[in-house]
Image (tube, rainbow, N blue to C red):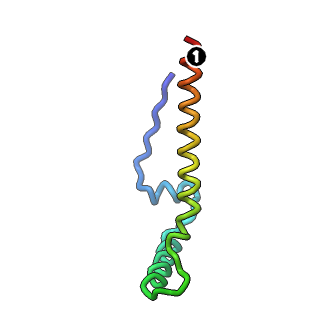
Amino acid sequence: MKVNVTFDMTPEEFRRLLGLPDVQQFQTDVFEQMMEKMKAGEEGYDPMSIYQPMMEKGMSAMTNFQQNLMSMMMAGQSKD
């Protein structure tokens, strides 16, 4: 049996339906503060320091995924 459900609503309506918070203003405020610091050239401020942890975790996840694929391919070859 296959059941398809279609929701005809905007992402904003869907967010409200699920009870998720509206973080748009918070994101806008954080972005504006970042831009102000970058424009002011605040000493010691490095915008890449914000993204560095995300990049490291993303790259390690990709490396793990590739290693898992390689081990599955090697396991399939050894059985033949």
Find residue 47 and report its horizontal and vertical position in percent: 50, 74
Find residue 23 and report its horizontal and vertical position in percent: 53, 68
Name the residue at 58% across, 29% down: 71
Q: In which quarter of the image is the C terminus?
A: top right
Instruction: Tell which of 47 and 18 is nearer to you.
Output: 47
Instruction: Tell which of 2 and 70 is nearer to you.
Output: 70
Residue lying furthest top in this view? 80
Name the residue at 53% across, 55% down: 17
Name the residue at 56% across, 24% down: 74
Q: How many labels does the image show?
A: 1
Q: In this view, does 66 lie above or below 9?
A: above
Instruction: Tell which of 11 and 54 is nearer to you.
Output: 54
Find residue 10 and report its horizontal and vertical position in percent: 41, 55
Q: Give the residue number, with chain letter if any, for mark 1.
A: 78
Q: What residue type is labelled 1?
A: Ser
Task: Categorize mark 1 by other alpha carbons within 10 Å: few (<14), some (14-19), many (20+).
Answer: few
Q: What element carries label 1?
A: helix
Image quarter for residue 38? bottom left
Find residue 58 and report its horizontal and vertical position in percent: 54, 52
